[in-house]
Amino acid sequence: MNAAIDVFKRNEFPGSSLAALNAWVAEVAALTQPDHIHWCDGSDAENALLTKQMLADGTLLPLNPETHPHSWLHRSSPSDVARVEHLTFVCTAQPDDAGPNNHWMAPAEAHAKMDALFAGCMRGRTLYVIPYCMGPIDSPLSRCGVEITDSPYVVANMRIMTRMGAPALARIEREGTFVKGLHSTGELDPDRRFIMHFPDELAIKSFGSGYGGNALLGKKCHALRIASHQARHEGWLAEHMLIVGIENPQGETHYIAAAFPSACGKTNLAMLIPPEGYRQAGWKVWTVGDDICWMRPGADGRLYAINPEAGFFGVAPGTSDSSNPNALATISHHTIFTNVAVTDEQEPWWEGLDTRTPALDWQGRKYDPANGPAAHPNSRFTVSAKQCPSYSAKAEDPQGVPISAIVFGGRRASLVPLVFEARDWTHGVLVGAAMGSETTAAATGAVGVMRRDPMAMKPFCGYNFADYFAHWLSFDRAGAKLPKIFHVNWFRKGGDGKFLWPGFGENLRVLEWMIQRVEGKADAVETPIGHLPRAEDLNLDGVALSDEAHDLLFGFDRAGWQAEFAGIGEYLQEFGARTPQALKDEQQRIAARLAH
Ligand code: TSX
Ligand code: MN
């Protein structure tokens, strides 16, 4: 059935340093029994052929070629629309090495379970071998992997999200090491679905899902869970952070890395458009990445960061010309849409895009509001970062970009001010470890419940959080020139339940204050929770804030923070005896200062 693809069939590569790869492919083929094996070279011709096949078999549906050239719609199985944390495991020899933040299974048991699922699963299908590089192909910070999959949709997405194909294979041949990711969609049966990580073997096995985070193994599985483990051993950080460059009118650019839990607008911040006055003054914002940041100390002691991804796998709902014009421009062509609705003109549509009514919902049914939202709340676009108007030229720099500030944030209706600065690195690590967000309607369960999500890594840290905090603390050493650490909250609400801060482009005012703090040019007030700006320390020209907004966005509520710190103390206890003493001491020091 996949006869056309057979012309690319290639079972062996010359050269002995690919022996390990060839042996692994042969071993997987013996287990999974594919009809064909296809080594992906990443070429345009290969992509054109795969796209043609997916259009022919209905995996992809055409969208309006006039309004959305070279763009396709994929509808996933309705029971396969999101990551599955309860089916995601970290398989280390000792359960404590995975920690209370992960589901754990013994490696031998996990391999046996997965190999039983993979046995014969590719009969009648093509096995695709995807060599890929996470990060610029010539960067020392980049790392390679190979994903084996039976899903051409995965190949098409990996081609956008990673540096895939011949150059990655050449680097693997040179380096001899790569992360092994094995994936099959299986029968898409939620009861036969597992995502297993073997950090000590640099291996991933994923079965039964075709959805992004479960199936595009370069992203969450490799670039966060496996990479965080590698990073700990090699002295770097693999983080769930956007990277954005802020260029001032003098042409100087500061790079900021920021971690937020889901539904806080990471992609929007990464692609921010300055307010009118800032634009006229010459401020520019450059997008380096919207989801993942790998960083390590450079020779000068500063942290240098790369975005290991080559594209954006963004949530569609809420993306509009007012929330994120750069994203909308980015996805106007050569984009794969997954689980969005379509208009009667075959244009992709989602809630929050505009006021039109779609023709078909994400499952292809005639749109009926009684069935819920037209686009799935977790519907996505996959698009090359190169199409983003604000894409930074430095995003392809093998050296990475120097990070001036690290920002943690969450969605907090009460208590937490607009912005504060940690006193030092240890305090900043505590701020990151204690961060959390209130749940939104998009997530399942109750709305407005506070969930702690340290460094936004709760679903993604491939090892024990207590060891992770210790690893973060270890960067504070002689010769280090570490970024300042800040906390922000765009989501503070007033007594009437309305947001007090306009957010979006106006957030640049907060980023400007951070940069001035880094340069020693802005003032702040010292409080037990850190340095807070007074309203007059920010440029608020043209922003109308009520007296209540001033008080709540820039104020410090001692009684409220006493309760918060009691909660943080309890939370740290959950990670047990391995929690670093320095972090517990920092919590106690601040709690004591709050007490009087
Ligand atoms: O992404 C957001 N950001 C960061 C932008 C750079 N969102 C969307 C969150 C869902 C993904 C925000 N929502 C932000 C924000 O800063 N702030 C808010 C809350 C808000 C919503 C609507 C308004 C104001 C604030 N509208 C008006 O005031 C008219
Ligand atoms: Mn993410």
Image (cartoon, grey):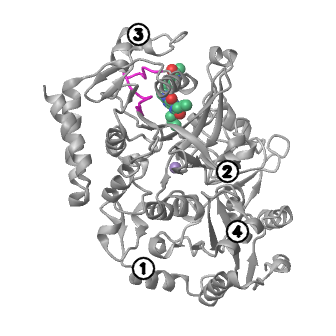
The outermost residue toward the bottom is 30
Mark 4 sits on what residue? 171
Secondary structure found at label 2 = strand
Q: Is residue 74 left or right of residue 578?
A: right
Above or below — where is 484 with respect to 107?
A: above
Distance Cα–Cα, label 4 vs label 2: 20 Å
Distance Cα–Cα, label 2 vs label 1: 31 Å
Distance Cα–Cα, label 3 vs label 4: 57 Å
Give the image quarter of residue 464: bottom left
Image: magenta residue range = 487-501
Could you tell me the amino acid type at mark 3? Answer: Ser
* Mark 1 burial class by Cα count in 10 Å: few <14, some 14-19, many 20+: many
Ranked by sequence position, the earlier of labels 2 and 3 is 2
* Mark 4 burial class by Cα count in 10 Å: few <14, some 14-19, many 20+: some
Mark 3 sits on what residue? 546
For residue 245: magenta? no
Q: Residue 39 in the image: state x and y as whole percent.
A: 75, 76
Mark 1 sits on what residue? 110
| Mark 1 sits near ligand 2, with its Cβ under 8 Å away | no
Q: Residue 543 in the image: state x and y as whole percent.
A: 51, 12
Give the image quarter of residue 168: bottom right
Q: Quadrant of the N terminus?
A: bottom right
Could you tell me the amino acid type at mark 4? Answer: Arg
